[in-house]
Amino acid sequence: MHPREELRRAMALYAVTDRAWLGGRTLADCVAEALAGGVTCVQLREKDAPRAEVVLRARALAPLCREAGVPLIVNDDVEAARLAGADGVHVGQSDAACADARAALGPDAIVGVSVQTVEQALAAQEAGADYLGAGAVFGTPTKDDAVITGTDGLAAICAAVDIPVVAIGGLNERTLPALAGSGADGAAVVSALFAADDIEEAARRLRAAVRASLGA
């Protein structure tokens, strides 16, 4: 289990990759730009790629994240995270259970869980999650079937648990101010970062917006 204050800092600007937004640019180059701009955590999200490709991509990103002192998290695939030597895994409600992920990756891994309700948040905390991804706070083009929690639902989740919470779903410079007062420790971004022409500058602006709205 990682120190909670360390994880809270890592949640501030949480970058979730999506190669659909890269416009022909390489994933490694885009992540390097995001890191240079100030992202504090990177999640490799490869929903449709075979495990072998996920492992290769994670191994390519690991040195970049390590040099920046930023955790590398693999989405959904616990075994890919283990094989790649990633810092941890993020699982959903329908993915590998939090307890199973912990058992597979060991006590030093970071295990995050997606939640939409207070009940799910409390269950994940009890199962040993290190942090929660709460949302979708707003509608998002990256997940059109997402359950919308809204800012009230986010605030209720944050108030119910002791572990760090990162808000996710439809977050960008325009919507980030709505998180003020929610209790969230940070914001996860996808298209607001990786669809930008200048990813490094987008990361700087998003990081500033997170500081302004959350003090993170």
Image: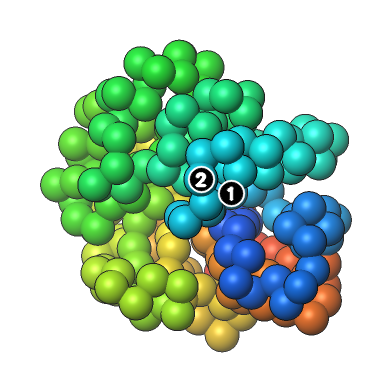
Residue 28 seen by the camera: yes
Numbered label attached to residue 50: 2
Q: Which residue is drawn at 45% across and 80% down?
A: 141
Of the two numbered discs 1 and 2 on the same chain, state the one appearing first in sequence. Answer: 1
Q: Residue sitting at 79 percent across and 68 percent down?
A: 25
Task: Kindly give the residue lying farthest to the left in the view shown.
Answer: 119
Is 195 on the left or on the right of 65, as rendered? left
Q: Disc 1 and disc 2: Cα gap in Å?
A: 13 Å
* Front one among 78 and 181: 78
Name the residue tied to disc 1. Answer: 44
Residue 26 x, y percent position in the rendering: 78, 61
Residue shown at the point (70%, 71%) measured from the top left: 22
**Residue type of the residue flagged with mark 2:** Pro
Residue at 50% across, 81% down = 175
Callout 1: SS: strand
Q: Which mark is residue 72?
A: none
Task: Residue lying at the far bottom in this picture: please name it.
Answer: 174
Which quadrant does the C terminus fall into?
bottom right
